[in-house]
Image (cartoon, rainbow, N blue to C red):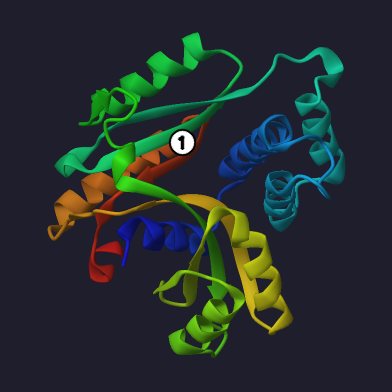
Amino acid sequence: MSGHSKWSTIKRQKGVTDAKRSQAFTKIANAITIAVREGGGGDPASNFKLRLAIEAARAVNVPKDNIQRSIDRGLGKGGAAAIETVVYEGYGPSKVAIIVEAATDNKNRTTPEIRGAIEKNGGTFASLGAVSWCFVDVGMITVAKDGNSLDDVFEAAVEAGADDVEDAGESVEVYTKPGDVEKVKNALVEKGFTIQGAELFKKPTTTVAISDKAQAEKVLGFVEKLEDLDDVQKVYSNFDIPDNLLS
């Protein structure tokens, strides 16, 4: 299975410190603002990207007023500087491919910060298109097993229109076409499954196998350093690390 997907699951299970939670609130607020700008307006009924962002916010108890302020900012209210999505590509340790999605109101600040973090931690900053060819856009739904087997989730997910599933230990990652993520998620909820998260995701089509623990720690540390940057929303990578090296 994809080591990057497994690593995301482990981080969710570990929880976050207060400092990380505050940073997460800011990143979720930016995700809501961008969803309004890029997804078709401030009405979640007609903007499924906004619905996903609001669900993610509610899952970590972001206050309702904060959500509304983020929507208003996306609509251009309040006079705050506009936030836009910027994407960067490169390579990390062991030549793993990385895509960094950031949200910023100042590209002149964000670009050198991300480039510096990549290069200072053993990576290589690359031009757009250098690694994006080895990722595909999908919807990803994280389903708690709760006593169900992988086959149970697989059968229900495929019946609902999913394309594939992967075992992630105590949960199952369900992959869909980007436009089907909400339909499949709702169908799984109706069948009684517990949904831990739903998002749009870049899934690697080719992976880099990491078999050495020291190298695995270096790769994971590299990704964490990028994720800790304030402007970074998501980091995607194509490393494949065995479960025993992730524990």
Task: Find residue 117 and report its horizontal and vertical position in percent.
Answer: 33, 25
Does residue 118 appear left or right of residue 178 in this picture? Answer: left
Question: Does 108 sit above or below residue 124?
Answer: above
When asked about the image quadrant of residue 7, the answer is bottom left
> Taking 44 as reference, is 182 left or right?
left
Residue 74, horizontal then vertical, whole percent: 76, 27
Q: Mark 1 sits on what residue?
A: 228
Q: Is the residue 35 above or below the residue 9 in the image?
A: above
Percent across and percent down for residue 75 are 81, 25
Q: Secondary structure at mark 1?
A: loop
Which residue is drawn at the image coordinates 58% and 40% (left, top)?
19
Q: Quadrant of the C terminus?
A: bottom left
Q: How many marks?
A: 1
Q: Is residue 203 visible?
A: yes
98 or 182, which is in the foreground? 182
Residue visible at 23% across and 54% down? 207
| Classed neighbour count for the residue bearing mark 1: other residues with Cα under 10 Å, few (<14), some (14–19), many (≥20) | some
Q: In the depicted view, which residue is nearer to us: 200 or 119?
A: 200
Position of residue 222 measured from the top left corner of the image (x, y, whole percent): 30, 39
Three-letter code for the amino acid on which mark 1 is drawn = Asp
Is 67 displayed left or right of 134 in the figure? right
Q: Quadrant of residue 131?
A: top left
Of the pair 217 and 148, the residue shown nearer to us: 148
In this image, 220 relative to 182: left or right?
A: left
- Residue extending farthest to the left is 212
Furthest residue in direction top, as rendered: 108
Q: Is residue 222 visible?
A: no
- Residue lying at 33% horizontally and 30% vertically, measured from the top left: 89
Relative vertical location of residue 11 with respect to residue 107 in this rendering, above or below: below
Give the residue displayed 49% in from the left and 61% down from the top.
14
* Quadrant including the N terminus: bottom left
